[in-house]
Amino acid sequence: MTGSPLRLDPQSRGWTLAAGGACLLPLLLQLPAGLAMGIGATALLVAATSWRNRLHAVVRMLLAGILATVVLAFSHFAIGRDTGCALLAAMLAIKPSETFTLRDARSLLGFALFAPFATFLLDQGPLSLLLGLVGTALVLVALLRLTDLESGFQVDPAPGWQRLVAVGKLVAIGLPLALAAFWLFPRLAAPLWGVPERTMARPGLSDHMSPGDWVDMLSDDSTALRAQFSGPVPAPSQMYWRGLVLWEFDGRTWRQPGWLGAYPVAAVEPGRQHWNYQLEVEPTSSHQLVALDLPTTVPAGIDLSQDHTLNSRRSLDTLTRWQMQSARPAKFEPALSPLIHRLALSLPPGYNPRTVALGRSWRAAGGSDEAIVARAMAMIRRDFAYTLAVPPLGRDSIDEFLFTQKAGYCEHFSSAFVVLMRAAGIPARVVTGYVGGYWNQVGGYWQVRRSDAHAWAEVWLPGRGWVREDPTAAVAPDRIYDTLADRASGGNLLGAQVPAQVFDIGDWLRHGWNDFALGFDATRQRQLLGRLGVDDVDTTSLALLFVLVALLAVAWMGWLVARAERERDPVLRAWHRVDRRYARLGLGRAPSETAGDWARRVGLTHPSLAPALSQLSRRFNNWRYAGPRPAREVAARRAELIQALRRHRPGATDAPHGERP
């Protein structure tokens, strides 16, 4: 018959819950803010309300059902990578409600270790790694505490930092194998298995645009891409990072027609100035790759659309790097096909009558297309203002913007401008992407953030083809070209100004991590081995090299673990020292001898050594095999025994300390 489960003491339960929370934190940081706050608050509430008593099974089931429903609602009931990770976080949040025994604690800690691993499916940045390592270290510390609880040494007065040192030693033991796996394991061009698409999209360019869609993105200062130029660098005012082109308008929403991807690519005559650069694109859920307007080369794995936008054949949900070349066009599709011409002039019937009437009146008044474009830009520059604080627009959103509101941001300006041009008989379309760039002085590269998302217009003019027109820049050029520099000149943190260098260093560290770890591919691996004198190594040879180094690392780990296991208990270490002292006299203990048998054998040949050694052997046996005792008594008597063993020499006596175990 087995005994009752060993219950956790408050300290062990506290360590267990703290370790679980530390593992949950990096995963929460990758979830949508509202969902992460809800799961985090639930975890704290469950831990507080169930500290003394287990929650009823019905309550636990109700909590699980509510959290699962909320997670599915956030993911629009789509099953994918984000949904699975969020469900894992939700279940881990309510796990403390049933953690009261040693078995419960080990179950929670084992479950908690999945959270950092799930985090790496969503983000491989240095912060995720650091928080994951902290959580894993605290799990190991908690497991050490549980081991002491099970063995009867739960009263060990050793401070927490000593346990952290012990965990650090364990991590160091496994470090050679981890480094061998990172540096030498053959890098594959494609993963061994597919990872589901993300269901909770990160900010990125979309294939549609409606008024108000971009408010969240325009307030997101996270990095979207980094660019390093080799050769000439365009001025920030010319850094238009072309993304999607939107043609179809239903009165409120602009969309990219799906059939356009199969249409022949438009002819382009590039200008003289070319720019060569490397793009480092942060992960998004989009397939859209941006490039300086216009790209003249198409990287492998990318398709070029009719309107010269770049579409990746797979989701850009991991860090990617691209070698690019761009040039401003001298002529861009100077002749329009009838189908493209109709598409670039189409307007939904019955919408925005005042805007349509204004455009038609300008056309009726005569003048060239260039003159009509200049007239529209002058009107916008004179009468309009830039602001993100825009009330919702109604059915005729363009009319409301042009004749009533007269204030908005890039979505409003580009949309209204294109509708006005089409009403005047000028082919026009909306282009989305990013604009500008901030020079990171520490890293030596250009940084474009998600808040630099922008929409502008292109109009088709005879003899020139498509020409870029940016009505937002006509109203607020500082917003377009200088926003990042203004923000980076000093932010507010707890009431204090933060120097620009802090932001530069932060992004430079992320860029360095991308280059060092995430960008370590097969090419970088070959370069590393070449510097070590290993040239032209094929996959088979590399695999054999990895196996050899891994076996050596495992052997090293086994030796260190065995050595550490033998010497973990300080009492046992002191006892082994006594054995070595007697071994120098030819009286060492045989491996098969118990402490008592050894003392009796020594006493038969050297009676003068018997009293002290017999006394120590009895105290040692009592310590190793006696039952549980009160905490303070165990700690005190262990310290006394260690001191006695350290002082003992063959022929000396420990009588002053008596025979207490």
Image: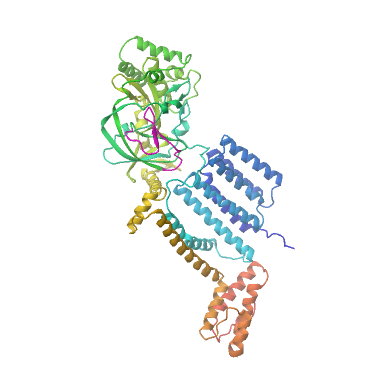
**Could you say where residue 228 lies in the image, as x and y percent from the top left?**
32, 41
Q: Quadrant of residue 109?
A: bottom right
Query: Residue at the location (37% across, 15% down)?
Result: 425
The stretch drawn in magenta includes residue 404: no
Magenta segment, principal secondary structure?
loop
Q: Position of residue 205 (x, y in %)?
A: 44, 33
Occupied quadrant, residue 382: top left
Q: Looking at the image, which residue sits at the far left?
A: 272
The mark total stands at 0
Residue 93, placed above or below residue 284? below
- Residue at 72% over, 62% down: 3
Q: Bounds of the magenta span?
A: 295-319
**Left or right, residue 357 beside residue 601:** left
Please, is residue 330 above or below residue 420 in the view? Answer: below
Where is residue 266? Give x, y as percent: 35, 26
Q: Position of residue 371 (x, y in %)?
A: 30, 16
- Name the residue rendered at 75%, 63% in the picture: 1
* Residue at image point 43% right, 55% down: 185
Report the residue that reaches farthest toward the top.
Answer: 364
Would you say residue 230 is visible in this rendering?
yes
498 or 209, nearer to the observer: 209
Q: Within the image, what quadrant is residue 309 found in?
A: top left
User: Which colouring convention does the figure follow?
Assistant: rainbow
Is residue 409 something that shows in the picture?
Answer: no
Nearest the eye: 573 or 184: 184
Q: Is residue 317 magenta?
A: yes
Q: Quadrant of the C terminus?
A: bottom right
Q: Vertically, is 626 above or below 115?
A: below
